[in-house]
Image (spheres, rainbow, N blue to C red):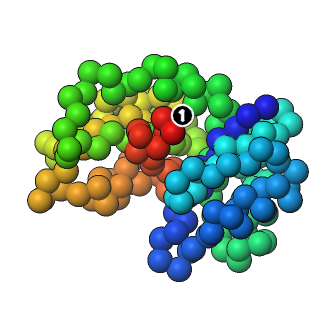
Amino acid sequence: MKYAAFLLGINLGTRSVKMAYLKQLMESQGYKDVKTVVASGNVIFDGAKQKPEQIAKKLEAAYEKHFGFKIGVIVRTMGDMEEIIKADPFKKVKVTPNTRRYVLFLSEKPVSLSIPQSKVKEYKVLKVTPTEVYSVLEISRDVKTPDIMKALDVSYGKKTTVRNWNTVVK
């Protein structure tokens, strides 16, 4: 079965993980056809049919043992990813050079599926599901991506990871 794994918070400061090492480690854990996508911790691989949460726990333990620090992991089946892409929650968004479309992957179902109102007019949550949050940001001098990421951590918890829509489609 094919899966996608998203690693949380790697290649930030001292938490450096080379994608070649990540690929080798995945293969040593028995996964096949391992491919990394962008150097921010996205891995596509084949493995035996398991619950994504079980794979995530196994990978977190292997990464901590190998790299010496905790790395959170969120796993989705490629079927889940294909459904996300097919649904295209951003199809009505007018994209400009300053538009950023984000998918926040959740490790746990959020307390509420209601769409929160943003205090920042440049930022809008489009859709909240039990497993993802889809949002759009128009970057400006006053509002940058890191500001929004901090707000998402407060709303949805620390064990989440955000990916740009372009990366998700890759």
Residue at (63% x, 52% y) in the render: 36
- Label 1 sits on a secondary structure element that is loop
Left or right, 25 with respect to 152, comes to right
Q: Where is residue 168 in the image (x, y as percent from the top left)?
A: 49, 39
Q: Using the rendered image of the protein, determine whether residue 81 is visible from the camera's viewpoint.
A: yes
Residue 127, image quadrant: top left
Q: Is residue 93 above or below residue 10?
A: above
Q: Where is residue 53 in the image (x, y as percent from the top left)?
A: 72, 42
Quarter occupied by the N terminus: top right
Q: Where is residue 130 in the image (x, y as percent from the top left)?
A: 52, 30
Residue 93, image quadrant: top left
Q: Is residue 5 above or below residue 82?
A: below
**Between 143 and 100, which is closer to the camera in this rendering?**
100
Q: Where is residue 125 in the image (x, y as percent from the top left)?
A: 30, 35
User: Which residue type does callout 1 highlight?
Assistant: Thr
Q: Using the rendered image of the protein, determine whether residue 159 is visible from the camera's viewpoint.
A: no
Q: Is residue 30 above or below residue 24?
A: above
**Between 151 and 47, which is closer to the camera in this rendering?**
47
Residue at (63% x, 63% y) in the render: 19
Left or right, 128 with respect to 139, comes to right
Residue at (40% x, 45% y) in the render: 164
**Residue labelled with disc 1:** 131
Residue at (82% x, 45% y) in the render: 32
Residue 17, image quadrant: bottom right
Extreme-bottom residue of the structure: 14
**Between 149 and 46, which is closer to the camera in this rendering?**
46
